[in-house]
Image: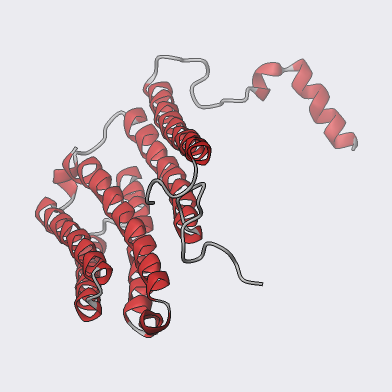
Amino acid sequence: MRRLTAIGVAAMLWPNAALACPICFGASDGPMAEGLNAGIAVLLGVTVFVLGGFAAGMIRFARRARRGPDREQA
Amino acid sequence: MEIPYTVETRPDTGLFNAKLGIWLFLASEVMLFGGLFSGYVLLRTGAIDWPHGPERLSVPLAAFNTAVLIASSVSMVLSRRALKIGQFAKGRAWMLATIGLAVAFLGVKLFEYREHFHAGDVPARDNFFATYYTLTGVHGLHVAGGIIVMAYLAGPGAAMWNRQRVRYENRVETVALYWYFVDLVWLVLFPALYLL
């Protein structure tokens, strides 16, 4: 517990040493930052695609349920 | 108690259980490969120097494998069609052809791996080979999984054709959806890894 408190106090006194991202050190235009942005964009695109698919499926089910059964084959 | 909608479609969704299940599974698979692909893009875009695929990998072998996988999708379609019109022997023969093509794909992949390992191109060499082995390895495991399931359906699982024909057709349909997905993943991996 004492050790944890000491680490916490040290982090408050020297905040630069406790930066969350030790890779780019604030250089937002470096290749690593560009790569990070591209990776995030790809994963975001995939997530939007999957969630969009879920939403489209739900809308299809709702429409089908409203219309009544057996009008359309799977 | 009997589980409903294992054979017939549910009236409101228009899907039987397994088909809904395989779509949900494929959604999770898209996320899996999406995460891996995102990591690949991060490393490649972030790298100061990244080798071009043709410099390190064999494009003719990969192109051959692409043709093999596309052919396996066609044979899967033919298998489903034959089963749909009641031609079991023909449907099973096409499924066996699909298995054969899938085994050929893995054979070529293992040959590629062996050549790379002999040349010292192991995953630890650099990020290029680390991502190459990770992406193609996970895809290869999916191909192997498909082979196991198809071998079951063409072998011991085929007994269901005589007892519950529609249910058997449904099973083949879900495996086919999975197989098309595995092919689609390769069609993304091939240009990304080998051509760019």
Which residue is rendered at x = 36% and y = 49% of the image?
B130
Q: Is residue B168 above or below residue A6?
A: below
Nearest the eye: A68 or B25: A68
Instruction: Indicate the quadrant where residue B72 lies.
Output: bottom left
User: Residue A59: where, in percent of width, then height?
Assistant: 49, 34
Q: Quadrant location of the N terminus of chain A? A: top right
Q: Is residue B110 visible?
A: no
Instruction: Indicate the quadrant where residue B127 lies.
Output: top left
User: Residue B17: where, in percent of width, then height?
Assistant: 51, 59
Q: Is residue A18 visible?
A: yes
Q: Give left or right: position of B66 versus A49.
A: left
Which residue is rendered at x = 36% and y = 29% of the image?
B46
Nearest the eye: A69 or A10: A69
Nearest the eye: B52 or A18: B52
Q: Give left or right: position of B5 versus B113.
A: right
Q: Is residue A71 above or below residue B169?
A: above
Q: Give left or right: position of A8 versus B131.
A: right
User: Residue B155: where, in percent of width, then height?
Assistant: 34, 83
